[in-house]
Image (tube, rainbow, N blue to C red):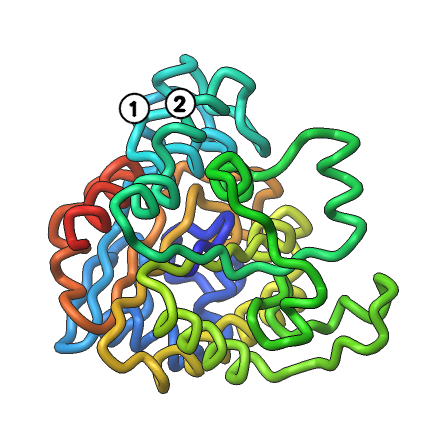
Amino acid sequence: MVFLDGVGIGAKDSPHNPFFSAPLPAFTKLGGGTLPSLRNARHSSSIASCVPVNATLGVKGLPQSGTGQTSLMTGINAARLIGKHFGPYPYSTLKPVIAESNIFRQLHDSGKSVCFANAFPRQFFEYIAAKNRASAITTSWISSGFALNDHHALAAGEALSADITNARWPSMGYPDIQPISPQKAGARLASLAREHNFVLFEYWLTDHVGHDQSAREANDVLHNLDGLFEGILDNLGGTLLVVTSDHGNLEDLSTKSHTRNPVPLMCAGRQHHRITDRVKNLTHIAPAILELF
């Protein structure tokens, strides 16, 4: 599973929607043969399918990462539970819900091998120790009793950098961490999926560049992501790839804020229709994956 923070389905409008400003062949393959847009959001091919997913969860206001990711990871409508959308981090009363019901814990408790593929630098460990704040996905992993990957795991090829290519690590004090291509990162993620029953990679730069409204940075991010997906799809084998998001943002660079647009659910590989056929909103994704297992 690849989680993309802040990616919705937008208008087919290249000045404002970077998905339509440059060729993205792997994204197109994941979309069932075309890139989804608001007028044309549902597609399917023999290898992949794409459906729109409601991220508003029946709650007024703009969807946020804290509640959206909690709903995605647990199958529980977090926004309705606390009466509002909240983010970027989980609302305090949601942390016990995450700890008890997240998909990592549920799969592990049923005897499955799980992996959170992201690697984190020293600065991140210092931050969460001082602030006690992390995304709902990272909170899901930690609260399930698992340790986060560090630079040793990244250097050994057992984890992925949050920026995909390792480009940021030398500036954070890790000169020995060598850059890799997005395609090689995708192949590494596919390799991890052969070692574990469930692997999740969290990518947050999509939301970051959406807030910045930078078309150039958005194109760079999407180019790296397309390479990542190329590497995954070329090495997918009998694995199922699930790609989704928590709320819209990047698909509309005319605004700095999140959007109410649906988010894509793109699945490729074995039994892809068994996920896309039953998902309507964010709370349906974790139960669909659990049912497949």
- Disc 1 residue type? Gly
* Left or right position of 246 against 77: right
Q: Residue at x 79, y 53 (%)?
A: 122
Mark 2 crowd level (few <14, some 14–19, many ≥20, 10 Å Cα): many
Q: Which mark is residue 79?
A: 2
Q: Residue at x 29, y 24 (%)?
A: 58
Determine if residue 265 is in view. yes
The three-letter amino acid code for the residue at tag 2 is Ala
> Dot 1 lies on which element?
loop
Residue at mark 1 to residue at mark 2: CA–CA distance: 8 Å
In the picture, the disc for residue 58 is 1
Q: Could you say where residue 232 lies in the image, as x and y percent from the top left?
A: 40, 78
Relative image position of residue 120 (x, y in whole percent): 68, 56
Place of residue 90 in the rendered image (x, y in percent of width and height, measured from the top left): 53, 28
Q: Quadrant of residue 50?
A: bottom left
Q: Is residue 138 left or right of residue 289?
A: right
